[in-house]
Image: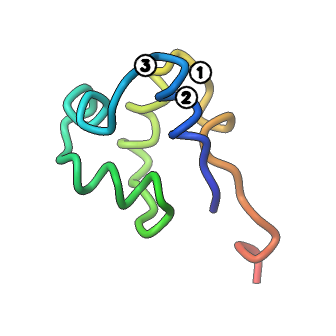
Amino acid sequence: MKNTIKVERAKKDWTQADLAEKIGISRQAMNSIETGKFVPSTLLALRMAHVFGTPVEEIFKLEDTDFE
């Protein structure tokens, strides 16, 4: 699964630490999600969408390999 977290953060001029604080996780966890090493729970994905003011589908997108 790919994501546009870095782009969305840049639009708001937020650091990973800023976003992590807003959704209640550590900066290290935020880094793992942003770099694709960890897939967030539904709750975390929805929290991110909420703080960005965008639908979750605009932040997280499935790739073809996610269906194999």
Judged from the image, the secondary structure of the residue bearing numbered disc 2 is helix
Taking the spot 27% from the left edge, 32% from the top edge, the residue there is: 23
| Alpha carbon separation for disc pair 1 and 3 | 16 Å
Tell me the quarter of the picture where residue 47 sits: top left
Taking the spot 55% from the left edge, 19% from the top edge, the residue there is: 11
- Of badges 2 and 3, nearer the viewer stands 3
Q: Which mark is residue 54?
A: 1
> Quick one: label 1 or label 3, which is nearer the N terminus?
3
Q: Amino acid at mark 3?
A: Asp
Tell me the quarter of the picture where residue 39 sits: bottom left
**Residue 50 in the image: x percent, y percent?**
45, 21
**Residue 43 in the image: x percent, y percent?**
37, 42
- Which quadrant, please, contains the N terminus? bottom right
Q: Amino acid at mark 2?
A: Glu
- Of badges 2 and 1, nearer the viewer stands 2
Q: Amino acid at mark 1?
A: Thr
| Alpha carbon separation for disc pair 2 and 3 | 9 Å
- Label 2 with label 3: CB-CB less than 8 Å: no
Taking the spot 44% from the left edge, 48% from the top edge, the residue there is: 42
Against 35, residue 15 (above or below) is above
Judged from the image, the secondary structure of the residue bearing numbered disc 3 is loop
Q: Which mark is residue 13?
A: 3
- Which quadrant, please, contains the C terminus? bottom right
Dot 2 corresponds to which residue?
8
